[in-house]
Amino acid sequence: MGLSTEMSLRLVVAQLLLLMVANAALIAKPGCRKECGELDSIPYPFGTEAGCYLNETFLINCSTRYSPPRPFLRKSNILVTNITMEGRLQVQSLVSKDCYRKNNKTPANFRIGQFSISETQNKFTVIGCNSYGYIRGKIGEKNYSAGCISSCERPEDVTDGSCSGFGCCQIDIPEGLKRIRVEANSFKSGQNVSQFNPCSYAFVIEASQFNFSSSNLSSTIAKRVPTAVDWAITGQGNCTEAKNNQSYACKENAVCYEPADHSAGGYLCKCQDGYQGNPYLSNGCKDNIDECKLGIAQCHDHADCVDIEGSYRCECSKGYNGDGKQDGKGCIPNQLSMTMIVLGVGLGFVMLLVVSSWIYIMFKKRRLIKLKEKFFQQNGGFLLQQQLSKRSGTCDTARIFNVEELKNATNNFDEKRIIGRGGYGTVYKGFLIDNNPVAIKKSKIVDQSQIEQFINEVTVLSQINHRNVVKLLGCCLETEVPLLVYEYVTNGTLFEHIHNNDNAPTIPWETRLRIAAETAGVLSYLHSGAATPIIHRDVKSSNILLDDNFTAKVSDFGASKLVPMDVTQLSTMVQGTLGYLDPEYLHTSQLTEKSDVYSFGVVLVELMTGKKVVSFDRPEEERSLVRHFLFSLKGGSVFEILENGTVNDDNKDEMREVAELARRCLRVKGEERPTMKEVAMELEGLRRMNKHLWDNVEVNIEETEHLLSETSYACNYGDVSNSTAAYNSMKDHALVSFDGGHTMTLFEPSTTQKWQE
Ligand SMILES: *[C@@H]1O[C@H](CO)[C@@H](O)[C@H](O)[C@H]1NC(C)=O
Ligand SMILES: *[C@@H]1O[C@H](CO)[C@@H](O)[C@H](O)[C@H]1NC(C)=O
Ligand SMILES: *[C@@H]1O[C@H](CO)[C@@H](O)[C@H](O)[C@H]1NC(C)=O
Ligand SMILES: *[C@@H]1O[C@H](CO)[C@@H](O)[C@H](O)[C@H]1NC(C)=O
Ligand SMILES: *[C@@H]1O[C@H](CO)[C@@H](O)[C@H](O)[C@H]1NC(C)=O
Ligand SMILES: *[C@@H]1O[C@H](CO)[C@@H](O)[C@H](O)[C@H]1NC(C)=O
Ligand SMILES: *[C@@H]1O[C@H](CO)[C@@H](O)[C@H](O)[C@H]1NC(C)=O
Ligand SMILES: *[C@@H]1O[C@H](CO)[C@@H](O)[C@H](O)[C@H]1NC(C)=O
Ligand SMILES: *[C@@H]1O[C@H](CO)[C@@H](O)[C@H](O)[C@H]1NC(C)=O
């Protein structure tokens, strides 16, 4: 709506401008007057003076006899009121009248020479009641004659605007009339109407200038009426012929045409499109309009308007084809740019997709990282990091794994990878990038208050470099619950080997004794050998893992407690496994190292008897293995409950000693139980006695070397002020002597020496 209003406004302005331009353009020949009286425009080929018109035919006699001067056509008395370049003249022709009273007729003659009366614009008109009129003329050599009768009896009979015989009569005139005589007449018998219609009138009038009114019957009609006359350049034939004539009237930038509604014959000239001015004058047609600036130019949106002489050009902008005109073909994107556009849009879309999904992924990643950081912090990661960084980094202590590593290792914690479920979490088998098998323990939710302790455990455990302790490789704190990564021990648990009779061949007594000795050694080490004493708290056969050589690997420190150096007993929530649980601890909730001794005693009994610690399948008095064992031992029938095939003549004494040791371990009062160190030494002694000396030496050299190489990884701890005391005390325990003169080296003295530097 607004657009079209604006458009039409622009067009009006443009037309006004064009009009001004046209008026300013040449109309008359230079130096000739171009107006006369009320006729304000006399365009060439018309002219008022010699040299100002094309030839005599176009002479306008501007008579100064009148004031203002009046323009007459040639030498006639025909007054010219309008001249148009479209081949029209408006002249005043005389009216013929016949009045009753005066009884004299005034016929009117009208000759216009080379021009002709326009047959399309004019009508022969008779006005009056009881009237008739003639029109006579010549068309070429033909005589022409026609008449029109108009009658009415009462003034009421006539209708305003209607010229159809009642008081007014009109007929068309033929083509090519050049000379006419019109004559008005009255039927004398009709004198009665003279009351309201005193005269009859006849004239040729430009139809657009006449609208019959009943008042025309009574009032006097003007002496002259406007008549349209066609003019043209004649005598040279049609355009085709005239173009070759020397006198061809159309000048530069003008074209010849033969108007259809024209009876003058010959031709007319007009300026070419885009030019304005007088086509009959040399240089009359001028391009003094800038179509682009005027806003007439109608170019397509994708086209530039270029003003050229006489016209304008629409040039499609780059990448477009076509004529550029709004009403023409316009501008269409050419194939290449079309594909470019499609490609561009497509690419843009893809880019958008990529960018947005990238942003989304980044956002999610950030959230994940935030979460991981939260868990890391919550799980005491910074504390641990601090602890670990205190140790100068060259050593093989625990690593902090990131969660991706462990996810990859366990195939995203696949159910199929689960190798154990304990009270403290789930254990998965996994493979690190270097294809080393590891056991990954997913802890149960940790109590926030125990975080520090957990960290300590991890740090301490990571430093326990004991061949009979499952090695902690590291942990991951980025998950909600901490993940612990252990070395993978291949041969299952001791429990499985003792109690799964189906497929496990019974372990020979010597091996059992070794496993017991090794386990005791570990516990002894934990209780006194490690930096801070550790109470394992959950010693049982299912926490003793075995490798392919049936070497014991104590595991599951999930419940373990670190006991500060100056504290001998610790009050905790009672925790442990039924059957292995120290009854004193159960009663008092006072945790001491002796609780582990009791549990170890149970394991010893288990090893000897091959029976489950608690079994409801057995008769009531035998349900608790410990009670049954102690009872049998007291009754002297201990050999009856030992596992078939383990007892023979060679090891009877040994068995008895182990049984005795177990009994001591299982004493109700913790104080009366031996320490783990004593137990370990005793078992080791038994083991060695059992073998030939030669073999012993062999084994021990090998073992010592093995341990030496293992401990050579031991860390250069640097100055750990807080831990120095602990490690110093560890040095004291570093050499654990066993009877028989053999020494089991846990840490190489020289390495220990190094720590103090
Ligand atoms: C114009 O007309 C008058 C008479 O009406 C005549 O005397 C005069 O000569 C004419 N002028 C020309 C240039 O023909
Ligand atoms: C002459 O006639 C043209 C076309 O009919 C008209 O536009 C113009 O206004 C007329 N000029 C005069 C002065 O009457
Ligand atoms: C035309 O009319 C005139 C008289 O009005 C007459 O003299 C002449 O012969 C006529 N011409 C023709 C061709 O009839
Ligand atoms: C002629 O005049 C009558 C009334 O005088 C009027 O109703 C009519 O519209 C007019 N016709 C033209 C074409 O001017
Ligand atoms: C003309 O009028 C007179 C009286 O005024 C009347 O006698 C006569 O009949 C009328 N004629 C016609 C033709 O109506
Ligand atoms: C006819 O009457 C009307 C209205 O009175 C007037 O304007 C007009 O000029 C008259 N026509 C002629 C040809 O005189
Ligand atoms: C003058 O011009 C008219 C119209 O073009 C033409 O018919 C006539 O022959 C010309 N007269 C002369 C003398 O050239
Ligand atoms: C050229 O026009 C004149 C009149 O202007 C005419 O007399 C002459 O015959 C024409 N010449 C040709 C070749 O048509
Ligand atoms: C012009 O006139 C010639 C001869 O009279 C005729 O052959 C030709 O067809 C005419 N051209 C046009 C466009 O009327």
Image (tube, helix red, strand yellow):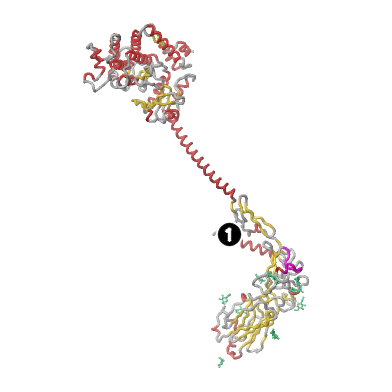
Residue 227 placement, left or right of 164: right
Q: Is residue 483 magenta?
A: no
Q: Which residue occupies 60% across, 58% down? A: 328
Number of callouts: 1
Give the percent coordinates (x, y) of residue 211: 59, 77
Residue in front for this viewpoint, 494 or 80: 494
Figure check: 360 above or below 155: above
Label 1 residue SS? helix
Give the percent coordinates (x, y) of residue 485: 41, 24
Q: Which residue is mark 1?
A: 6
Figure check: 534 above or below 412: above
Q: Which residue occupies 30% across, 10% down? A: 651
Q: Is residue 40 visible?
A: no
Residue in front for this viewpoint, 8 or 235: 235
Figure check: 56 above or below 634: below
Residue in front for this viewpoint, 41 or 235: 235
| Amino acid marked by disc 1 | Glu
Q: Is residue 246 magenta?
A: yes
Say which quarter of the image contains residue 226.
bottom right
Give the percent coordinates (x, y) of residue 18: 66, 63
Say which quarter of the image contains residue 566.
top left
Residue 736 placement, left or right of 630: right
Instruction: Give the residue furthest to the right.
Output: 50
Give the percent coordinates (x, y) of residue 634: 23, 12
Q: Which residues are magenta?
A: 241-252
Mark 1 surroundings: few (<14), some (14-19) or many (≥20) residues within 10 A:
few
Q: Is residue 465 visible?
A: yes
Residue 210 placement, left or right of 708: right
Say which quarter of the image contains residue 73.
bottom right
What's the magenta bit mostly, secondary-structure-wise? loop
Residue 133 placement, left or right of 685: right
Report the quarter where the N terminus lies.
bottom right
